Image (cartoon, coloured by chain):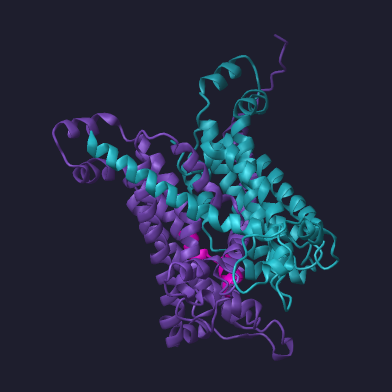
Amino acid sequence: MKKQRRIHLPRVFSRYYPWLLLSPTVIILLVLSIPLLIYSLYNSLLDYNFLHPERGIHFIGLKNYASIFSQPFFWYNTMYITLIFLLATVGIEFCLGFLLAYLANREIKGVNIFKLILITPLFVAPVSIGLIWKLMFNPSMGLINYLLWELRLPICNWISDASTALFSIVLVDIWQWTPFMFLILLAGFTSVPREPVEAAMIDGASGWRILRRIYIPYLKPIILVALLIRGMDALREFDKIYILTEGGPGVVTETLVYHAFRYAFRFFEMGYSTAISYIALIFVNILATILLQRIK
Amino acid sequence: MKKAQITNLVAYGVFTIAAILTLLPTAWAFITSIKKPWDIMTEEPVFIFEPTIENYVRAFIHPSYLFHQKIINSVIVATSTTIICIALACLAAYALTRFDFKGSSGIAAWILSIRMLPIIAVLIPWFLIFNSLKLIDTYIALIIPYMTFTLPFAVWMIRGFFLAIPRELDEAALTEGYSRLEILWKIILPLAKPGIIITAIFCEIFAWNEFQFALVLARIECMTVPVGLSHFLQGYRIEWGPLFAATMVTAIPFIIAAIFLQKHIVRGLTLGAVTRY
């Protein structure tokens, strides 16, 4: 063993040693979040159009928020679509993922190959997924209408029809993210101890009863983590909407985030759009707080 | 016994349908990428055709696409982000797992909460800041915002891998006279190497696939792969062939990564918040 140089650090220094190691990360994340959010809070109180500097930048207090909240459009369109998208995608993905995980949680051969096939959408870029489905939905070249036609089922215009556009995007989201729910819940299922399940089976409990009384209580924490992460991502969804519909036709697929994006980078109303993005931030925080409290 | 067999049969049926539904759109995109234009733009889908690689050539050679440039940009941005994040995250994770200090779990939770920010809430201020600094359309304008999301992720992932290394090893090394940084460098890092590589691949994928920042902050010279793909939609006529040729080329590395990462994907997708599985 080679002789080590021994440096006796002063006690004060060793007390702050972990902070020294943490400091680059903490400082970067502080700089990247707090000042930015304060700057954006200030911006949300301005009347500021980026493309028309001659109009001037005026401090208008809470007027942006007031005008957002007083518009029926905001509640009946933007918030309504955001909530429908959130509940439909997370809800259906959870149910399908749960069903698949429940079925995979038994000793059947080849389950690993199915698992490998099912996880591929998770690695394809969201933009590519949007493009692939844009072709699938195409009324003439797309596979979907062709298959529906061959099966003598009614066809429709999917993303270019106002009545089906939101449903189409929900469908693509389900295709993309159901594997996520499946994998996480399967990991949960396999971690449930065998003994209580076997004991209940010997007692003659029905499959449904075992599911409700044994599996669900064990799975509860991981279910909440999965819902939290998926919910956050569903609220942030942007890529697929941009590629598939750009919020249209009209505004029927314009979620809160897309609404803010359109005002920021189509009309360049920086004050107004920042106010919308702040509402999105608060919305996400409320949801995260509710779910995190349940996890603890 | 019979009932179990029926359930197994149902399971196979459900999985087969799920696998077909999963593969069909991607397979169709691949088929489109090897079709000639007149086999693509048809009244209804064509299944029998003469395959070609001209779409792949066109996506890279044609002056309005030059897709390899986008790939180079994406590699630079994603790799820089990953290297910085992994280096910082190793130090931070070491502090969080090897020292008992007040506020350690609070800091860890705060770091994770940054990852949950809606992108749009930081995108608009970044746009204004980079615009006034004349940094729009530079690599820096992408690497810095990407760290907001990849750094918390890397810290949590690596924290989980470090926690799995027994602390007795550190204590033994301390009594032998190793310094703290030597322990990290000579003991912890070699042991956690597979975990760190997995984390790095996930960071690379996140940064590579990111679209919203890239769309606004790097429009021309530094355009990345996802934005480049979305640009195929902007002509008056969409060229599906080269579009899906480019999609396929950029997706293949990640399909390979998916096979490699299979066992760790649950941890990666839950941002390292679930370390037991």
Residue displayed at 41% across by 71% down: A83
Left or right, residue A213 beside residue A287: left
Q: Is residue A4 above or below residue A277?
A: above
Q: Is residue B166 visible?
A: yes
Q: Measuring from the top left, give residue B103's x and y in whole percent.
A: 48, 43
> Which residue of the protein is positioned furthest toward the left in this rendering?
A203
In this rendering, position of residue A290 left or right of residue B144: left
Compared to residue B75, the image places residue B277 above or below, namely: above
**Magenta stretch containing residue A97, yes or no?**
no
Q: Is residue B103 shown to the viewer in this render?
A: no
Magenta span: chief secondary structure: helix
For the N terminus of chain A, which image quadrant? Answer: top right
Q: Quadrant of residue A24?
A: top right
Vertical order, B218 against B10 (above or below): below
Q: Colour of chain A?
A: purple
Given residues B210 and B180, the one toward you in this image is B210
**Chain part drawn in magenta:** A232-245
Which color is chain B depicted in? Answer: cyan
Q: Residue at x 58, y 39 (%)?
A: B259
Q: Residue at x 28, y 45 (%)?
A: A216
Could you say where residue B163 lies in the image, as x and y percent from the top left? 51, 31
Q: Position of residue A148 (x, y in %)?
A: 46, 68
- Residue B77: percent from the left, percent from the top? 74, 53
Q: Is residue A37 left or right of residue A290?
A: right
Q: Quick one: which residue is furthest to the top in this view?
A: A1
Q: Residue B182, relative to residue A31: is it above or below? A: above
Is residue A244 shown in magenta? yes
Q: Is residue B120 left or right of residue B83?
A: left
